[in-house]
Amino acid sequence: MSAEDRRAFAADRRAHAALSALKKARWTAAAVALRTLARSSEQRPTTIQPKAPPAPKGFLKQAWLEAFEKDAADVAAGLYPPMADRPAEPRFGPRAAVDLLSDALDVEARRRRRGGAEVRKDAPRAYPTYYRQNFHYQSGGWFTPESARRYEAQVEALFVGAAGPMRRRALSLLARAWRERDHRGLAIVDLACGSGAFLENLSRTFPRARIAGVDLSQPYLAEARRRSGVGALALANIERLPFADASLDAVTCIYLFHELPPRVRPLVAAEIARVLKPSGFLAFADSIQPCDEPRLERILEVFPAYFHEPFYGTYSRTDLPALFATVGLRVAGADRAFLTKALLLEKA
């Protein structure tokens, strides 16, 4: 590495440290505010009785900090530039903050009445039944511009600023695998790209590649386009991807499989394998499973009930390497940070 490269990476490290400090402060404050609102109601939701023991004292903070440390190490190594992990709003100012806090009261009320399917009465029947739900008890499900606009801030507040560093475990694996490769012309598609946070990370990491996103929500695609600047976005069902056989160099899939019913997961895995070129990669990130970190099992036990994740229980028991092996994808790398696990899978 040249002296000029070392100076550039040193500047990146300083910028990343400043961004991380700002993120931790901002999202810690947001998380405290949202939880205070949630506890302010006199009515309590149905009590959840977890069986797993609580995490050892200090372990949660240690695991949370590890996500930031791994992210910083990857920036220092030149795998990707510092990422701001901002909300979808260009300026997350007072008005957006008030909107987020106000909506938190609606989300909490929905949680208390177990309103996980309220959106179904208004959602078009053309969408799969499993998709027409208020995942996370969020207002509007996946179907409104307001939901798309709030989503990234809600996720960052939930994970106290660690959502970006966690999902970048998948980006780290892909960037390492392609470190010596010419990125010009490589085709990457982000499945279920949502409001575009990971799509933005991809476009900044691989600026010479051809990057596209796929999602089933038009409002979320509109946010993804505005946020990431990526124009190649397709409204499509991931069970039937609009790409030719063996046409993509990489597919990324972030926090999707735990929201798919058991019967759909093998269909999506097969579609991913179909569109990947030989030696192409799937960069996968999703929730850790109890087998990955028993000390966090109590959180994993409570999470699906408290945040309306109806398919999380079966996901937590799924043998992911075995699932992908059935369609010809082998594990080529793995990583983990806080509540997220990442796999890099290569097509034979």
Image (cartoon, helix red, strand yellow):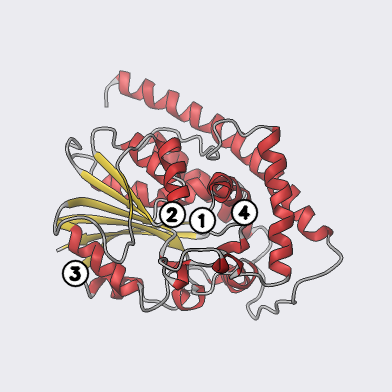
Name the residue that disc number 2 marks. 217
Say which residue appears at 24% left-offset and 33% top-offset: 208
Q: Is residue 234 visible?
A: yes
Query: In the figure, is residue 22 to the left or right of 277?
Result: right
Q: Earlier in the sequence, mark 2 or mark 4?
A: 4
Question: Circle 2 — which element?
Answer: loop
Q: Which of these two is toward me, 326 or 77?
A: 326
Q: Are marks 1 and 2 in contact (CB under 8 Å)?
A: yes
Dot 1 crowding, Cα within 10 Å, few <14, some 14–19, many 20+? many
Which kind of residue does numbered mark 4 sit on?
Answer: Leu
Q: Which of these two is toward me, 302 or 72?
A: 302
Give the image location of residue 162, x and y in percent.
55, 48
Q: Are marks 2 and 3 in contact (CB under 8 Å)?
A: no
Question: Circle 3 — which element?
Answer: loop
Dot 2 crowding, Cα within 10 Å, few <14, some 14–19, many 20+? many
Name the residue that disc number 4 marks. 158
Say which residue appears at 72% left-offset and 71% top-offset: 113
Give the image location of residue 310, x and y in percent.
53, 74
Cα–Cα span, label 1 and label 2: 6 Å
Q: Earlier in the sequence, mark 1 or mark 3?
A: 1
Q: Earlier in the sequence, mark 4 or mark 3?
A: 4
Cα–Cα span, label 1 and label 3: 34 Å
